[in-house]
Amino acid sequence: MAVEWERVGQPVFDRIVEAVVHRVYDATARVEAVNGRGGDDGIDIKVTQDSRVRVFQLKYYPDGFPTTAHKGRRKSIRESFARAMRCGPQEWVLVVPCVLTTPEREFVMSLADGLAVEVEVWDRAKLDDLLAAHPDVEASFTRNQLFEAARVYGQERSLLMGGVDDVSARVTALGEQVDGLDEHWTVDFARQDDTVVQTLRGKHPRAHEVSPIVITLDGIAPLEPEQAEAVRRSLGFGLDEEVVLPRGTVGKMTVSGPQFLAREHQDVEVRWHPAEATVQDGLGADLVFVHGDRVVASYPGVLKHLGRGSTGRSVRVELAGGQLQLLMPNAPGAAASLKFMFSLEGLEPAAALRVLRLHRRIAAGGAFEVRTVQGVVGGGEIPPLPEAARRASAQLQLFLEDLDVVQRHCEQYFPVPDELPYQERIALRIARLLVDGHCVVSPFLPQARITLNGHDSPAVRALLSGEPHAVQLPCEAYTVQVAGRLLELGAVVAFHPEAAVEPDSARAARTALDAGHGDGAEVTIRSADGGRFRLMLQRSLTGSEPVPVPLELPGFPEPR
């Protein structure tokens, strides 16, 4: 039903136009009603799109503005236009609920003579076109017209004039009609945007036996390997995952069963999700690794799914930080397959280590069982992963252990970072070894710069002679940066058994000492053999000369 523009009145006309303008421009511009309708600045609605400004002037003139009648209307339009030009719009739009005559349109267009502004008219024909493009807007403003007609025929509820109460009443009545389609099956339904979702439901537990429903898929195109594997897991083992066959994959889908359901469908997307077997909510399950009769490792979790298909059975267990998926074929002697999916995101190192140790246990292969208080629900023998995969897991474990030790030492706890620059990884490894009491060669210390305090002595002169000497340099607050955080390890000593001051800086320092200006003089000292300085926490120092331990980081040469 179209809007009866000559009957809606000024307030409703303004609301309709404002709703249409919002619908047309909201996605790309900012729409605002200025000063309410009939604003003093000649602007009813302002649309700002980047640097472009459109001004809409609304005039409720159902019978237009001819020169012979309603002479004040043209004056009002001209004055509104002049006021609107003060804000410098690029476009001015007059909105009226009538179809303009040629003289009326020429009058409006002449307003822009000599001005850098575009003038446009939204008349009744334009408004009708816009409402046809947005029928929900039109429907919301024509409800009263329909209600008058509906009241005559006693159909007020059909138009939902009672609001959500009428919605509930109509849906309930429709559900009762659907329930009467079949004695064994009914359909639950829901609306999601423009889509109606229908869910088939048995009226009693044996509906599928006394009135079976068969779905047949014909003309299935070759599946992608990943799709074919998903079908195998779902149909073959009853795994609780959704399988999607996109449009174009299935030539025809035939539904056989009750008359109200039986039909053929083409050009369909097919999705299915196996019905889950009943699993007690929160039922504990242990993933147990065994060697003969001996338990060598056990990890607790929660049993989430037990399924059965044409080929075998499936088990799914949620574990801390991960999920276990087990497929067990019915065929005697056939190997079970175990898949462990995990994520370290958001976990602190200690928790991540536990997840990774489980992964490494699975990677090593061997016999396992999934046990609950009700007994063993699955198990098998898994082969070990390739050596390369196990090496990568070992490297990750070393990283997590380093991070865990350093975090506990510094009492700064944070989740495992997604990425870590290699330089920070080296610094973290050094920090962990220092915390463990070891001496480490730092690849970041090829030299040291020291500042003299002006005190002259034979020891200072010996150091400045250029000859190699054993050197110890204390640092009271040694820090490393990891994942944007500064972690302070405490006091360290940097030292080298044979280090010498660079000749140029030694010469300058001696000259300053001779002149009595040695305080503040800086010298650079390097190892005599071109190696790096050693580091050790001061608390770990003993009377004997410490021996550096290797960093043992794959792909990184040991510093000397």
Image: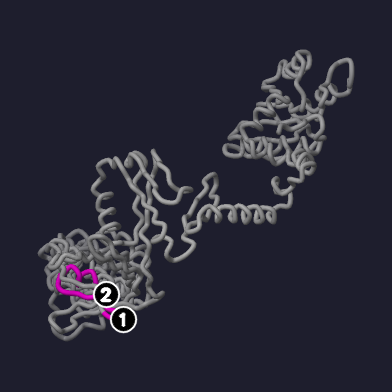
Relative height, residue 169 to residue 57 (above, below):
below
Give the CA separation, mark 1 to mark 2: 8 Å
- Residue 239 lies, in percent from the top left, at 31, 62
318 or 73, which lies in front?
318
Quadrant of res 179: bottom right
On the rendered image, what quadrant is the N terminus found in?
top right
Which residue, given by chain and number where applicable, does mark 2 sit on? 377
Circle 1 packing at 10 Å, graded few (<14), some (14-19), many (20+), is few
Eyeballing the image, is 483 above or below 148? below
Helix, strand or loop at mark 1: loop
Q: Residue at x 25, y 42 (%)?
A: 222
- Asked if disc 1 and disc 2 are in contact, CB closer than 8 Å, the reply is yes
| Quadrant housing residue 488 | bottom left
Q: Is residue 14 left or right of residue 310?
A: right
Query: Is 340 colored magenta in this rendering?
Result: no
**Does residue 486 appear anywhere in the picture?**
no
Image-based side of 189 in relation to 302, left or right: right
Residue at image position (62%, 53%) is 171
Q: In the image, which disc is placed on residue 374?
A: 1
User: Residue 311: percent from the left, percent from the top?
Assistant: 22, 61
Q: Position of residue 277 (x, y in %)?
A: 36, 68
Asked if the magenta segment contains residue 361, the reply would be: yes
Start and end of the magenta stretch? 358-375
Q: Is residue 57 above or below residue 149?
A: above
Question: In the displayed structure, does residue 229 sit left or right of residue 114?
Answer: left
Please, what is the three-letter code of the amino acid marked with disc 1?
A: Gln
In the rendered image, the quadrant that contains the C terminus is bottom left
In the picture, measured across the screen, residue 484 lies left or right of residue 524, that is right
